[in-house]
Every structure is written in structure tokens, then in C-alpha cells.
Amino acid sequence: MKAKKQLLLVLFLLLSFVFLSCAKAEKEAGGTDKRGAESGDSQEKQKDSREEKEAQAKSIDMGMPHILLEEIGERHTDANYHYLYSIDSTKLQLKEEGAEFNALRKAFEDYNKEVEELYQKDFAELVNIANTSEEAKRNVANYLGNTPEVKTNSDVIRADKSIVSILNSKSIDYTGGGSEYQHYSVNFDSVSGKRLAFSDVVKDRDSFFALAEKRAQESAGTAVEFPPALIQDIKEKGDALTWTVNAEGVSIYSDIDLTGRSLKSPKVLTVYFDEGENLFVEEYTKKEEDYVIPLFDNMYLDVDVDGSGKREPVYLKKQEEEGMFYLDISVVSGSRESGAVEGIDGTPYLLKKSGKYYIYLFKYEEDGVTLLYRIDLSTMELKPEENWSVDLSAREYYFKNVGNIEYTHLLKENFTDAKGFCGAEDNGFLSTNTVEIDWLIDAEAYPKPDGNRYKISSNHVIQAIQDVPVQEVDVNGNVLKEGTIPAGSYLLLMYTDNASYMDMRIIDEKYIDNEGNEDFSIFNLNDFSQFQYNGTCYRVPVERDTQNWTLYINGKDENELFRGMLYVG
């Protein structure tokens, strides 16, 4: 009887196993069919995903993201103040604070953690080699070569409702004997914050590179030649290739020339959105009607300037003249060339506005002044006398010594929005200051400041020597009542009209670093959050005696009322 029960139990288990196996096989078969269906419907799902993201962006009234570049660095010296080594890197910050960019903001936070980890890794390698390399020690001790360094800069190629595209340029010189250069990119979906792969933007890799090879062959013998042999090297990098997306197409980059020499300015080749039907994912080919594309270093773009359907290369031409310190800088479009202006260097941006193309050229002068020129590509006319004294703003700068280490920090604006940019210029009220204001670009691509209330962006602080009668004003500059700045107050400069007044606020001494001496005080702000202030300011009326280089406040010399002013230049 016992044996019979055991036999029945074994049969039951065997039958159960068979049923389970059949069920599993059926499920797997169904799964295989499902995966096949998913593969067949992948394009439909991509379309649905795009439509969902577009609906999401519309539902939250998503605007244009504006990217700030946070540059951080440190330089180490020995007891004799020889620079031993230095390192710099760049993080990404989002200017907008609204919830519509939470996903992108989180993506930047994750990316910045990676930047910090790489910074520490590079720094450890830099210190190790600088301390063990005889060449590095010799260069430092005898002031030979360069300071051993690792430096990474970032450029924003595109930032709009669809995509944020960043190009990083890294120079590495462990011994001071010469730099090697690397370029790498990072691309984000503006809505989801997703880190984009090349395949997220380019549907057919082989077709893309076939077009790239064709473009490279056509460039032979031109000023913008891209050797076709470099294409194969780029293809072999696989997912590690360097690529960015601008408003006209997708660009690929080569770090080396045909000899294998490392290039500070990479070779760039762009395949345009209108060249390959169904080659690119549509959501990233959509662009604003007006847009901006930077043309850094050796970059150029083929543009249909006159609407004829024919693209021609547009780029900046820099020509050195023997025995001259300045460069002759001009703009080239196809076979046409603009007039030239002289400068130390220049950065061009291609601007499309109201259906026309322009170049905005920020030209750098020897005295630190930057002049903006507007070149209409339909006429190629560059008027040297038609310029604006403005540069892209940079703020939150500090240079701090802690022992034998110099720490630096800078937050830089970018020009990626055809509506305008945040511009900076110098101001000489109560110190040499940098001020910023939004600049608007009209339908004919002429720039102008948005009002006359400039915000101070430098971190200088002054101190009242005596009580100073002033007007109290609100954050918008409206006069509230008469007031007094008490003697001894530390004053952070906040706003000015660049003509007749300076608005300032009182801050606590703990927010100040005194970097002067007994004879001369230099007060610098050590907490930039003090600029985030919407309370009452104190307005000081300013009169400038340009002949005697003197500033008067209420009829008194500025030095009778304040100390800590610092003028340069």
C-alpha cells in the first residue's frame, strides 16, 4: 500500500512538471512573438514617445533653457612661489529655477558629480607625475616650459527646448613639456534630462558616415578641408566618438591630424538635417525659427545664405601679419569676404534672425575691452565704426589663497538664444567694476541693452568712513525715502545706471575678506549669495570729473566718504 502511494506521488509530480514545462514554453513562445512585434513597432513607439514629450513640454509651457558654465580650479606653489601644478574644470548649471526643468537640472547634478570624480582622479595623477618626473621638477625649478596642468573647458553648442549639446576640450601637460588635447561631448534631452547616445539622434549610423565621407571628399583643397582618412578613425571609436548637435545638423570631431598630431582646435565636419531623409530623429531636428550657433576656433558651417538651395561655408578668418601683435579678423561666406578689423582674437556666432543670417563677432582688444560687431551675410558688410562695447557676462569670480593653494571660481553666461544674451561691460564708479544687463536683439539683428539698470557682477566691497546721506530705494530702483549710511558700514555695490548713481546694500563683516594691508584696504565678498537680495538699497549720487579722474558724491571727493576703492587700468 505504501509503495502504491509513493508511485502515485511520483506520477503526480511528473505530470505537474509536464504542465509547468508546457506553460513555460507557451509563455516563452508568446514572449518571442511579443518581442518580434515590439521590434516591428519600434518606430511607432519612438513616435509615441516623442509625442508624449512634446505634449509634456507644452503642458508645462517649457521655455528655452539657458546654461551657465561654472569654472573651478586650483594652483599649487612651493615655498618659493614656483607654480608646481594647476588644474581647472567646468561644471554645468541651469539659469532657470522653474519646475519645468527639474529633469534637466537633475541630469546636470549627476553629470557634475562625474566631473568632480574626474577632477579628483586627474589631480591625483597630476600630483603623482609632477612629484616624480625629473622633467617636471626641472621645468618648475628653472621656469622652463609650462606649468604642469590639466585643464577642461566647455562650450555650449546648442541649448533649446529639444536638446542641450556640450563640447568639452581638455588639455593635459603633466610635465610642462607640452600639451596633448582631447575633446569629448555630452548631450541631454531638454525635457527628460536623458543622456543621449549617438543612436538617439542618428537613426542610421552607416548612412550618416557615408554622407560624412562624401562631405570630406568634397572639402579637399578648400580652406575648410576635412581629410577623408580621419573619418575612419572616428568611426572606429564606436560609442566613444565626439559629436554635437546644432540647429543645422550633427557635427563630428577629430582630435588629431593626418600625422597623428594632437590638435588644440579639433577638425569638425557637419552632416546637415536636410541631407538625409529619415536619417535623424525628428524631435532633435526641430529648431526655433531664430537661432544661434557658435563657430569656435576651426569650426565652420555650410549655410544657404541667399535661399538658393546651395550651401556655402561660413567661418572666421584670422590672419597674422609679420611684426604685428594684432590679427586681421574677417568673415568668409563662400567666395565672399568681409572687411577686416584688428584684434587679439575673436569669437563668432552665426545668428539667424527674421529669416536672415548674420555673424555676431565678439572681438578682444589688448586693454581687455571686448567689442561686438554685426555682419549681415547678405551684404558681407562689416562697419568698423558700428560696434558695441559688450561681452558675454561672467560673475562670481574669486581668487583666494589658502596656504600654498590658489583657488579660482567663475560663472559664465552663454549666447545660445536669438532673443538676446546677458552682456557685461566695465564701470568706474567707486572702483573698477563689471556690470551686467540683458541685451535684446531686434528683428534686424541689432543689439541693445534692456533698460539702464545694470547689476554689479564683480565682488568688490567698500566701507563708509563717515555717515553718508543717501536715498533709500527698492529693488527696482524706485526712491522710497531719505536715509543715511552709518559710518563703518561695509557696502556691497548692487546696481547702477552707468551715469549718475550707485545703489548698494549693507552687509555683515563676516561676508568679507580683507586682502589689503595697514596702508591700503581691499575688501572682497566671500559669499555670493549676498547678491540674491530684494530688500532696500542705498543710492549714492555720483558725479565724475573726467579731466582730473575724480569722483564726487554730494559734492565731496569719494575718498572723504569711503575707503577700499580699487581702480585698475
Image: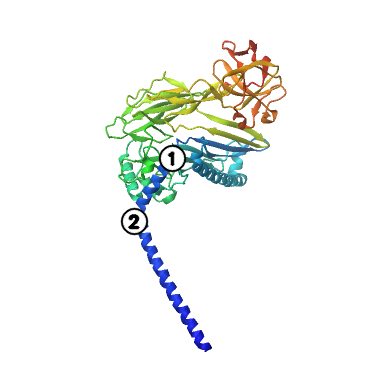
Q: Where is residue 303 in the image (x, y as percent from the top left)?
A: 33, 34
Q: Which amino acid does label 2 sit on?
A: Gly
| Residue name at image x 44 percent, y 46 percent | 196
Nearest to the observer: residue 266 or residue 258: 266
Q: Residue 78 carries which label?
A: none
Can you name the residue that lies furthest to the bottom here? 1
Q: Is residue 568 above or below residue 245?
A: above
Label 2: which secondary element: helix
Nearer to us in this view, 168 or 75: 168
Which of the labelled discs sits on residue 40, or is there none? 2
398 left or right, relative to 62: right
Quadrant containing the C terminus in the rendered view: top right
Task: Give me the residue at 40% from left, 38% from top.
Answer: 246
Nearer the observer: mark 1 or 2; the answer is 1
Left or right side of 100 for 276: left
Q: Position of residue 337 (x, y in %)?
A: 34, 27
355 to 563, vertically: above or below: below
Does any portion of residue 551 appear in the rendered image?
yes
Q: Which amino acid does label 1 sit on?
A: Ser
Report whether 382 appears left or right of 70: left
Residue 372 position in % (x across, y down): 44, 24
Q: Mark 1 points at which residue?
A: 59
Which residue appears farthest toward the front when viewing the image? 1
Seen from the viewer's position, the closer of residues 62 and 201 is 62
